[in-house]
Image (tube, helix red, strand yellow):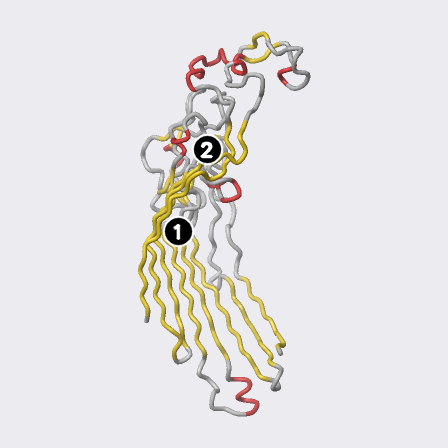
Amino acid sequence: MLLDIGYAGSHGLKFPETRTLNQLPDSALALGNDLRTQVPNPFFGQIKSGSLAQSTVSRAQLLRPYPQFTAVGSTAADWAASIFHALEVKVEKRYARGFTILGSYTYSKLIDTATGGFSGESLGGGGIQNWNNLRADRAVSSLDQTHRFIANAVYELPVGKSLHGVPGRILAGWEVGAIYSAFTGPPLGINSATNNTFAQGGGQRPNWTGVSPKLSNPTPDRWFDTSQFSNPPAYTFGNAGRNFSGVRADGTRQIHLSLHKNTDLTEKLKLQFRAEFFNLTNSPQFAPPNIALGNPQFGVVNAQGNLPRVVQFALKLMR
């Protein structure tokens, strides 16, 4: 038996992440409805297309850092960062008497300022809320998994080894393998279905009461306590963070089983039979709930996140 215990840590800097540069200064939001007032357009006649080609524009447009543009951004700007800490444990029983087992467990935490839609940001509270205050978006990552456990085993069945002829060919040479996986679900963030900040960039999250929205027994109809969130007033940003570590999507708990046998047909030919059972127990894993405040399905799970049991058989002729 081998026991391995270790620590892993990393600090990532200057990750490429697009940045918006033409959001209103936070102080301008105090003007409220006056931001939407139409005023003479100083660029009229100079710009030939788009909203800036009109004789009037909103006052908000002229208060932007670059009023002559409707949008200014920096693609793949190197501003994002992350930090990761993990306890890693591995237990292994070396192959003996036809049996081997390997188990690994990781207890970790990943914090970052942005993840990106491709990597799972759709689970969190949307994109950056306020480009003038990037630190407010530093939170537990949408990729975070507090607990991650995987165990796999292979056993060579001792049946038929002493038999000869047809009985030996049928009963001998079977191996069974299993993989058990148990992962914590990713953290969820809450966003607003309607953005009423009028900040000309960024998004809006709801206000949070400060009480954990985690439920002791979440159900698909009520995955978290939605009463802890409310719409912020117009021209303000909500105080909810990008993600909530205590409120997570459904975790993974699955067993995969395989059974295979190699049969020597001749000195050069071997026939392999495989039977594989994915999600053996047919356990459902719920998809993430709706996280948009203002949506009628807010806090409701309406889909399954994994496949039901899948069984497949295969024959393979090898030389």
Location of residue 165 in the rendering, given as x and y in whole percent from the top left corner: 56, 92
The relative height of residue 110 versus residue 134 in the rendered view (above or below) is below
Between the residue at mark 1 and the residue at mark 2, the CA separation in whole angstroms equals: 22 Å
What residue does disc 2 label?
191
Q: Which mark is residue 229?
A: none
Amino acid at circle 2: Asn
Q: Is residue 54 left or right of residue 131?
A: right
The N terminus lies in which quarter of the figure? bottom left
The relative height of residue 285 versus residue 266 in the rendered view (above or below) is above
The relative height of residue 43 versus residue 87 in the rendered view (above or below) is above
Taking depth in this image into account, of 249 and 126 the one nearest to the observer is 126
Q: Are marks 1 and 2 in contact (CB under 8 Å)?
A: no
Residue at the image point whose x is 50% and y is 50% from the top: 305
Name which of mark 1 and mark 2 comes first in the sequence.
1
What residue does disc 1 label?
184
Q: Alpha-carbon neighbours of circle 1 within 10 Å: few (<14), some, or many (≥20)? A: some
Taking depth in this image into account, of 193 and 138 the one nearest to the observer is 138
Residue at the image point whose x is 33% and y is 37% from the top: 212
Amino acid at circle 1: Thr
- At mark 2, the secondary structure is strand
Taking depth in this image into account, of 72 and 286 the one nearest to the observer is 72
Residue at the image point whose x is 42% and y is 59% from the top: 181
Location of residue 211 in the rendering, given as x and y in whole percent from the top left corner: 31, 34
List the single residue furthest toward the top.
40
- At mark 1, the secondary structure is loop
